[in-house]
Image: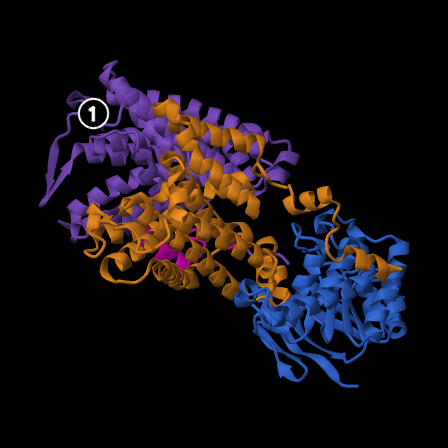
């Protein structure tokens, strides 16, 4: 029972983590809460569904297509809706992000209709594996495996590559990075591309996990992932992973012990409690105000 | 006579006007905490919802007159806000914002599970017990809210809030008890949201906890940012436009939200400080009328 | 003369760094005391300790004979300590007059109720009194004619003066000026010199941090010198100027022959 719920929780939590990473990376670099990020996740799910349903792609290929599509989408959104506002107040950029979010979800409503759509059965034939008294599906293992692989890939890009170094520098100090000859615009676009790709992968995985893709799936998933990012300490990549897993696991256990009707509140209750004890999140850096 | 006057207005148009009025009350409320004190609240719909359910239940279960009912709804909401605000207002910036969002979701889920709020079915709200027609009540509350906002903005209390918004450390060094003022402004802000919610409940005649989700909070925030943060005419203007916009965009029916979203982006990109941002209306009008701001003339003499 | 402010072995550590190390210092009522020292010596940190921005790790701070160590900044300000900031911290979106009115915050008492009952005579009287005080403070620093300009639009030197006016509106017994002459031209500095003297003559004790030696030497009654968080000298300007430890701190070892 415990093992079963733990695996359920980790599977759900790793999808939260995938989305949370995009929030946290963008926030780390331009201090923007990219509220359209949840919708990118939703678009990713739909693209994956299309690829599997219409073009009969296998699931990995479909996921790759969704990731590439959303990379472009993320970069375009940044260019149109955020870049002109980089010198304005953060709230203006935030409202702009909300505009994008409303736009994308209503576009999805128009194109795909109001009903949730499921992945066709041949997309991934899931089997159950019995470990002790736990039933673990190969789909869950796939989700955990893909998420882990993507996060390791991200960690590699951020820590070991030149562009990753530029990202870290820009996140440390935007202006100094620009003075050191880093092409900040490119770094920001790259960050959006990276974050959006992860969200798209998350979208496809969640679509399969719940076997439902709908125009309004981005909102709650986005909010929870944002909560996960803040829980871990916004701006911190390991924090987003930790926060996502923690939220997923607590949510699943909360439901398991009978609070299913409070499902959506659990994540936020944890968030509020943690912030009251650690006001900058679990792994967030404490900033000493200079006077 | 009032009823006759109200009845002579086209009901559809009147409905839009009442919507705008409630929008103005809500926007001015949020403007206190976000525009004036500079604390981003992403969960103001929760306060609206607390006010709406308090008001609805008071009408359903007691014989209280509507005016008292309105006041009590506001007061109860303010008390809830003060209770929540005390611990969370220590957080800063985006951490506070996500916390308010979290609380709003929690409130929503709690209401969806409470017996007294009729769970997910929502409440049918009877007509308010008042001799005045609803549009008149809304108009009166709008006037009171604008008056109170103006008074607050130009008072010692309001200046302390603005100081906190501009620089917390400097404000504290000037003797301002930041925590206390933040909680107070949060409570005042919630009071207005609660009153707005109570009006909303009785105007619509039906409320459901799900009506007061994240998107409702965002609606309010868009109003004050669109109009120009911290500006009373801005909030009134933004609330009017955004409350009426869905109606005026109705002819495009299914494209409505699409256009609304695009419009928000467009407006922010071209007027990042809001439509009335950076425009000092009072000074503008006074200058047009040839009036000098109070006190300048006297000071010129002092210099001599 | 009696000590208005007393630092007793005040110490603060940030992690491993001891920014202020066992500093004992007295500010006498009615004097102009300057605190000097090389960059990073901990001068501003001492101001932040006094005003409660950071609580001292060790040691005591007392004002008017009462301990103020560890009190929150707003209480300390309310006790009568006004300050300016090294990196100007004005309320940028507000007018010059509003900035000073906020300085006068502790001089009023009407809060939210006062705001809503603005028309009542006691509230209006208080508001009038605060306005008069604010204009008086602005006049003291020569900025009354700019009352309705936005603070952020003032030139640098005037922003520094506005900070002084704002601190004066507390009607403090002690004013802490953090590098008031920084970024000013010689003409502005001379005006500032007179301004600070006038403030002292009006009964406010002045404690300032400053880099400009000429300014400090011409203005202060006494000078204390800080180096690496430790007080290395204290005395009248001419004594401090001749002190070998001070010369060494400023010019490096070997400068004293």
Residue A32 visible in this rendered orientation of the protein = no
Height in image: A160 above or below B252? below
Residue A143 in picture, x, y percent from top left? 25, 34
Residue in the picture at 78% in, 66% down: C136
Residue C178 in picture, x, y percent from top left? 74, 62
Please state which of residues B299 and B213 is positioned toward the viewer in this rendering: B299
Residue C55 found in image quarter: bottom right
Please state which of residues C124 and B211 is positioned toward the viewer in this rendering: C124
Give the quarter of the figure containing the C terminus of chain A. Answer: bottom right
Residue A25 in picture, x, y percent from top left? 46, 38
Query: Chain B's colour?
Result: orange
Query: Chain C's colour?
Result: blue
Question: Left or right of B93: which side holds B48?
Answer: left
Please state which of residues C192 and A112 is positioned toward the viewer in this rendering: A112
Colour purple maps to chain? A
**In terms of secondary structure, where does tag 1 sit?**
loop
Residue A83 visible in this rendered orientation of the protein = yes
Scheme of colours in the image? by chain
Q: Which residue position is annotated with label 1? A: A119
Q: Residues within 10 Å of mark 1 (few under 14, many from 20)?
A: many
| Chain under numbered label 1 | A
Magenta span contains residue A283: yes
Height in image: C74 above or below A186? below
Residue in the picture at 50% in, 40% down: B238
Q: Residue furthest top?
A: A55
Question: Left or right of A246: which side holds B228?
Answer: right
- Residues in magenta, as a range: A268-287
Residue C187 in picture, x, y percent from top left? 90, 55
Height in image: A265 above or below C251? above
Residue in the picture at 75% in, 45% down: B290
Magenta span contains residue A38: no
């Amino acid at each position: 029972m415990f093992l079963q719920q733990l695996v359920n929780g980790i599977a759900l939590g790793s999808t939260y983590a995938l989305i949370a990473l995009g929030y946290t990376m963008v926030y780390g670099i331009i201090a923007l809460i990219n509220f359209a990020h949840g919708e990118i996740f939703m678009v990713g799910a739909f693209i994956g569904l299309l690829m599997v349903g219409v073009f009969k792609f296998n699931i990995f290929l479909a996921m790759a297509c969704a990731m590439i599509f959303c990379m472009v989408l993320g970069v375009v959104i940044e260019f149109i809706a955020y870049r002109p506002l980089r010198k304005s107040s953060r709230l203006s950029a935030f409202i702009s992000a909300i505009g994008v979010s409303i736009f994308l979800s209503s576009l999805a409503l128009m194109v795909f209709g109001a009903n949730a759509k499921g992945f066709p059965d041949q997309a991934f034939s899931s089997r159950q594996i019995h470990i002790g008294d736990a039933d673990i599906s190969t789909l869950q293992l796939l989700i955990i495996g893909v998420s882990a692989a993507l996060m390791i890939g991200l960690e590699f890009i951020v820590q070991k590559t030149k562009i990753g170094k530029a990202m870290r520098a820009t996140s440390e100090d935007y202006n100094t990075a620009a003075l050191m000859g880093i092409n900040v615009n490119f770094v920001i676009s790259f960050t959006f591309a990276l974050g959006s790709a992860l969200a798209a992968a998350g979208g496809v995985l969640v679509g399969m996990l719940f076997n439902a893709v709908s125009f309004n799936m981005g909102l709650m998933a986005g909010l929870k992932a944002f909560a996960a990012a803040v829980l871990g300490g916004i701006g911190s990549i390991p924090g987003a992973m930790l926060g996502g897993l923690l939220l997923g696991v607590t949510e699943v256990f909360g439901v398991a012990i009978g609070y299913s009707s409070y499902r959506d509140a659990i994540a936020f209750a944890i968030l509020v409690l943690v912030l009251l004890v650690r006001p900058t999140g679990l792994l967030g850096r404490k900033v000493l105000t200079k006077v | 006579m009032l009823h006759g006057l109200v009845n002579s207005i086209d009901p559809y148009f009147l409905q839009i006007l009442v919507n705008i009025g409630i929008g103005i009350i809500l926007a001015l409320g949020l403007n206190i905490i976000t525009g004036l004190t500079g604390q981003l609240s992403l969960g103001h719909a929760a306060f609206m919802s607390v006010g709406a359910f308090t008001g609805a239940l008071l009408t359903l279960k007691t014989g209280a007159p509507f005016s008292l009912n309105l006041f009590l709804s506001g007061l109860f909401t303010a008390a809830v806000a003060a209770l929540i605000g005390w611990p969370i207002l220590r957080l800063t910036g985006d951490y506070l914002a996500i916390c308010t969002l979290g609380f709003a979701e929690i409130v929503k889920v709690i209401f969806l599970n409470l017996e007294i709020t009729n769970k997910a079915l929502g409440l049918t709200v009877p007509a308010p017990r008042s001799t005045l027609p609803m549009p008149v009540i809304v108009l009166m509350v709008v006037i009171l809210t604008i008056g109170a906002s103006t008074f607050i903005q130009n008072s010692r209390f309001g200046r302390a809030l603005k100081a906190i918004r501009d620089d917390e450390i400097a404000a504290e060094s000037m003797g301002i008890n930041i925590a206390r003022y933040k909680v107070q402004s949060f409570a005042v802000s919630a009071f207005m949201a609660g009153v707005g919610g109570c009006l909303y409940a009785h105007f619509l005649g039906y409320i459901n906890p799900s009506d007061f989700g994240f998107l409702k909070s965002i609606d309010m925030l868009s109003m004050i940012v669109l109009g120009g943060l911290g500006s009373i005419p801005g909030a009134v203007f933004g609330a009017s436009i955004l409350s009426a916009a869905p109606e005026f965009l109705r002819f495009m029916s299914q494209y409505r939200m699409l256009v609304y979203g695009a419009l928000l982006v467009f407006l922010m990109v071209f007027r990042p400080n809001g439509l009335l941002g950076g425009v000092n209306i009072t000074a503008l009008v006074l200058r047009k009328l040839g009036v000098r701001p109070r006190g300048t003339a006297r000071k010129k003499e002092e210099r001599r | 003369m009696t000590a208005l402010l007393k630092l007793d072995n005040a110490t603060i550590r940030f992690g491993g760094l001891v920014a202020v190390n066992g500093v004992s210092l007295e500010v006498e009522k009615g004097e102009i005391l300057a605190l000097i020292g090389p960059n990073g010596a901990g001068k501003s940190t001492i101001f932040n300790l006094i005003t409660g921005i950071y609580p001292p790790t060790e040691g005591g701070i007392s004002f008017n004979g009462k301990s103020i160590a560890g009190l929150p900044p707003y209480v300390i300000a309310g006790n009568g300590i006004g300050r300016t900031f090294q990196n100007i911290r004005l309320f940028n979106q507000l007018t010059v007059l509003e900035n000073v009115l906020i300085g006068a915050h502790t001089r009023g008492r009407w809060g939210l109720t006062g705001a809503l009952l603005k028309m009542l005579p006691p509230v209006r009287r208080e508001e009038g009194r605060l306005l008069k005080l604010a204009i008086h403070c602005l006049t003291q620093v020569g900025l009354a004619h700019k009352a309705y300009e936005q603070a952020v639009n003032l030139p640098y030197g005037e922003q520094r003066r506005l900070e002084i006016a704002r601190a004066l509106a507390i009607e403090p017994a002690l004013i802490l000026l953090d590098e008031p002459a920084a970024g000013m031209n010689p003409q502005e500095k001379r005006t500032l010199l007179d301004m600070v003297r006038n403030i002292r003559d009006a009964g406010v004790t002045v404690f300032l941090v400053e880099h400009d030696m000429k300014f400090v030497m011409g203005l202060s009654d006494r000078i204390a010198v800080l180096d690496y968080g430790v007080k290395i000298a204290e005395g009248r300007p001419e004594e401090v100027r001749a002190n070998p430890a001070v010369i060494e701190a400023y010019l490096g070892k070997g400068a004293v022959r």
